[in-house]
């Protein structure tokens, strides 16, 4: 079916990204997986390419585009090649909306030019050991100093994508204790300089998938954070986090769909070349039926994602809608990718084949951004259940 969600500008950008991936990423990607992170130079190159400034207003060095569809193009092209840009998706898709929406004019002028160039990479720290999806249960605290000039930050975070290489981290912390009436109140966002005394990067976590993306534990011991680095209003962070969740979940859905589409492409290439019992694997009826089912699943995901992208660009994508598209795409992508790996046989289990990487990478999409169980709860609540 003809796809109409992208215009000529998006498709021109797609060609640029595809060429960049082929020249700058694919030849080195195995080494980056082994290292557990992309080189910092990649972020500088992405900055020079304009990737980090797409949605940043022109006065801060960006292109001033408002469409999230450019981010979708990047997700699709990375999946198509079986690679990733490390923690850069967090930098642009998660952190940037907070800076643009809640940052003061002074903060934007101070941070965004370096954000666009890749000289200042960002990450966001919400999850804590033992709390998981229960953000209201966070224990990290930020107490205002007696003279009112800075906060004193103490606590720990985990599963922080981009946490090893980040220069600034948006840390969610309690500036006031919860109350029985409102567990979600009293949480604020501090944009913490990672060079601050008392800020420490703990273990770089050894993950099942997304192995070229650095993920870390962070700890804060009496870290002084200037009040000028408070993002938005004190105590309003939970509302801010909720406001950005639809885009975050849409981004995960797009990535899951793109990985499933890539898996079908890799499987098609493999079964046409692989010979078993004197015939190509593609000639067997089972292969044809499996790939036909996968094609139908991918087409359904694409239609769902495209509609959600249009609604998001129009400012109409609701919380339940975003939860539903994430739930559907991540769950179905897992099925499609598993079937495509099966068609590869034993070779599909080898990391040198991109289908193996997709299989491992897609598993976390049913966990981060809210688990599938949380998504089901949100959708059910929207149905009056």
Image: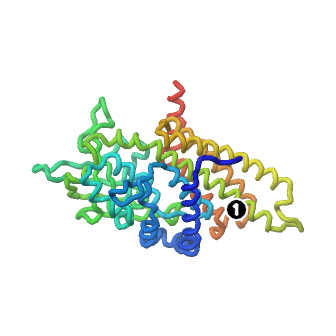
Q: Hey, which residue is sitting farthest top in the picture? A: 384
Residue 193 position by quadrant: bottom left
In the depicted view, which residue is nearer to us: 262 or 331?
262
Q: Position of residue 44 (x, y in %)?
A: 42, 70
In the depicted view, which residue is nearer to us: 59 or 348?
59
Figure coloring:
rainbow
Is residue 28 visible in the rendered image? The answer is: yes
In the depicted view, which residue is nearer to us: 227 or 358?
227
Q: Residue at x 33, y 56 (%)?
A: 59
97 left or right of 148 in image: right
In the depicted view, which residue is nearer to us: 236 or 247?
247
Residue 54 position by quadrant: bottom left
Residue bearing mark 1 = 266
Q: Residue at x 24, y 44 (%)?
A: 175
Is residue 90 visible in the rendered image? The answer is: no
Q: Hey, which residue is sitting farthest right in the picture? A: 278
Q: Which residue is drawn at 48% across and 49% down?
A: 67
Q: How crowded is mark 1: few (under 14 residues within 10 Å), some or many (20 or more)?
A: many
Q: Hey, which residue is sitting farthest left in the picture? A: 147
Q: Position of residue 197 (x, y in %)?
A: 23, 64
Please determine whether, in this image, residue 6 is positioned above or below residue 78. Answer: above
């Amino acid at each position: 079916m003809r796809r109409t969600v992208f215009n000529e500008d998006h498709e021109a950008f797609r060609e640029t990204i595809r060429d960049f991936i082929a020249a700058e990423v694919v030849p080195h990607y195995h080494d980056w997986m082994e290292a557990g992170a992309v080189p910092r130079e990649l972020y500088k190159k992405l900055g020079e390419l304009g990737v980090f400034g797409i949605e940043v207003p022109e006065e801060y060095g960006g292109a001033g585009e408002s469409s999230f569809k450019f981010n979708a193009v990047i997700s699709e092209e990375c999946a198509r090649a079986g690679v990733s840009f490390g923690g850069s998706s967090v930098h642009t898709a998660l952190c940037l909306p907070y800076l643009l929406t809640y940052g003061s004019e002074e903060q934007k002028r101070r941070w965004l030019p370096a954000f666009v160039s890749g000289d200042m990479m960002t990450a966001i720290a919400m999850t804590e050991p033992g709390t998981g999806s229960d953000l209201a249960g966070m224990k990290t605290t930020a107490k205002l100093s007696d003279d009112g000039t800075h906060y004193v930050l103490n606590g720990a975070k985990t599963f922080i994508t981009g946490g090893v290489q980040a220069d600034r981290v948006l840390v969610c912390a309690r500036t006031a204790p919860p109350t029985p009436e409102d567990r979600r109140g009293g949480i604020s966002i501090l944009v913490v300089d990672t060079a601050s005394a008392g800020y420490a990067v703990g273990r770089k976590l050894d993950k099942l998938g997304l192995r070229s993306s650095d993920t870390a534990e962070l700890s804060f011991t009496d870290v002084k954070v200037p009040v000028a680095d408070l993002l938005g209003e004190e105590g309003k962070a939970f509302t801010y986090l909720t406001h950005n969740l639809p885009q975050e979940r849409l981004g995960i859905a797009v990535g899951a769909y793109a990985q499933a589409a890539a898996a079908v492409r890799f499987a098609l290439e493999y079964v046409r070349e692989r010979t078993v019992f004197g015939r190509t694997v593609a000639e067997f009826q089972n292969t044809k039926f499996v790939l036909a089912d996968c094609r139908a699943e991918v087409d359904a995901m694409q239609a769902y994602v495209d509609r959600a992208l249009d609604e998001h660009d129009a400012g109409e994508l609701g919380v339940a809608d975003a939860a539903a598209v994430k739930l559907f795409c991540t769950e179905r992508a897992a099925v499609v990718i598993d079937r495509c790996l099966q068609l590869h046989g034993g070779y599909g289990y080898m990391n040198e084949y991109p289908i193996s990487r997709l299989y491992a990478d897609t598993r976390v999409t049913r966990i981060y951004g809210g688990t599938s169980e949380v998504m089901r709860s949100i959708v059910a609540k929207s149905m009056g259940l």
